[in-house]
Image (tube, rainbow, N blue to C red):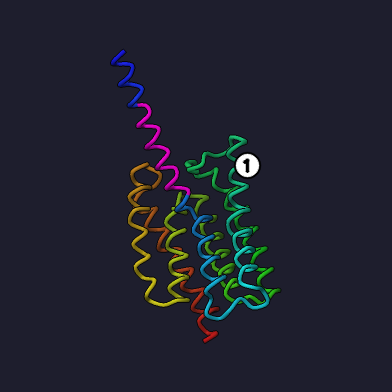
Amino acid sequence: MTNARHAHHAHTRSMDKRDVLLFFSLITSAPATSALLSVAFGFYSPIGTGGLLDYQAVALGILLFTLVPTVMTLYYYRKGIIDLELSDRRARTPVYMVSLGSQLLAMAVFFILNSRIMFVTAVAYVTLTAAMLAINLKWKISAHAAGIAGPVTALTAVFGSSMFPLYLLLLPVFAHRLAIKAHTIWQLVAGALLAFVVTFAVYSNLYLPAF
């Protein structure tokens, strides 16, 4: 009985640890961080949200940057096509494609509604997702690292150097993804660098000239 009880407790601890790691993966995923970015830009944009009220910009951003990719990811998961960690590189392709389609729609919507900050954000996401999709065909670059570095770079471009400390969020993300053997260090570094370069280039050319 004692051995069985110990085994049960060990199994429960193992399940709890896996649950915590999965939860951390979900809250640091690109769809989750894009929701936070939509809130930040919708409510606190220094140039306003154009033809949209602040809450409308937030709602559209969350719908197109977060909810559409998340719903399709859950659909693919329920169908057994992917796992929630997207462990299989090839299984990531349909998720990238759905995200890209939704981001292209967001780009068109925000352009039509003259919401400059949200339009620039959509352009950055479209460019980055297209690059990630192309690289993923041959190599498993880290979307989690990109999902942190991209939004932080966008926040820095809009709100200034006070956002720099947010780059430290990459440290626990790197540690977590390495711990669960989801990526190598180079895949993580590549994801972060690609997101930084793409986002910096887009905001430098499309957002900062507004000032």
Under circle 1, the secondary element is: helix
Residue at 29% over, 16% down: 3
Per the picture, the main secondary structure of the magenta-coloured stretch is helix
The image position of residue 109, as x and y in percent, is: 69, 68
Tell me the crowding category of disc 1: few under 14, some 14 to 19, or many 20 or more residues within 10 angstroms, Cα based. few
The image position of residue 181, as x and y in percent, is: 37, 42
* Residue 6 in the image: above or below residue 154: above
The one of 107 and 17 positioned closer to us in this rendering: 17
Q: Which residues are magenta?
A: 11-26
Outermost residue to the bottom: 211
The image position of residue 4, as x and y in percent, is: 33, 16
The residue that label 1 is drawn on is: 75
The one of 139 and 73 positioned closer to us in this rendering: 73
The image position of residue 78, as x and y in percent, is: 60, 36
Instruction: Answer with left or right where residue 87 lies relative to residue 177.
Output: right
Residue at 49% over, 41% down: 88
* Quadrant assignment, res 6: top left
Residue at 53% over, 76% down: 45
Residue 156 sits inside the magenta stretch = no
Outermost residue to the right: 112
